[in-house]
Amino acid sequence: MKKSSILFLLLALAVGCSMLSPIYKIAKDNKNHMNNLSTGMTQEELLRVMGRRTFNLGKLTVTNPYRSENLTGASGDYQVIYYVTSVELDDDIISDNELTPFVFYENKLIGWGWDYLAKVR
């Protein structure tokens, strides 16, 4: 019984320490900033709200925004800006499922999220 209690405490400590990783704070802050967004904002306005910073986290460098791309959809050309908004696995790799896409058409924010992005592709 004593061994299992110690093992449980060590596991809880390890999980708790991983939650202190800076990537969790970056994702949480980005998620909170999303509450201040609205459709119709320009890219510059979104960048001001969400922030533009580079975080050096040892093996991992996280930029805000994390990446951007231009794509052509059914109705024209779109710009997509991605921010880290969750951490699925603290593994020094940023996966698509840890990002939120923000979709712009003619420099205006028209929506965000993977479901919205799928609609314009």
Image (tube, rainbow, N blue to C red):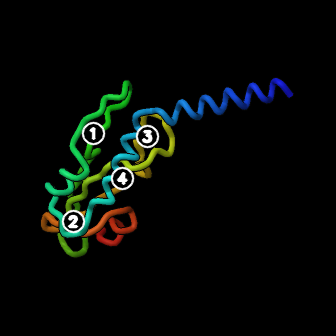
Amino acid type indicated by mark 2: Leu
* Residue at the spot of label 1: 63
Determine contact: label 3, label 1, CB under 8 Å: no
Q: Is residue 35 left or right of residue 98?
A: left
- SS category of the residue bearing label 4: helix
Residue at (31, 53) in percent of width and height: 33
* Residue at the spot of label 2: 109
- SS category of the residue bearing label 1: strand
Amino acid type indicated by mark 4: Asn
Q: Nearer the viewer, residue 60 or 42?
A: 42
In the current view of this chain or complex, which residue is farthest to the right?
1
C-alpha span from label 4 to label 3: 12 Å
- Please tell me in which quadrant of the rendered image residue 80 appears: bottom left
* Residue at the spot of label 3: 24
Q: Pinpoint residue 108: horizontal percent, then vertical percent.
A: 16, 66
Q: Pinpoint residue 61: horizontal percent, then vertical percent.
A: 32, 32
Mark with earlier residue (3, 1): 3
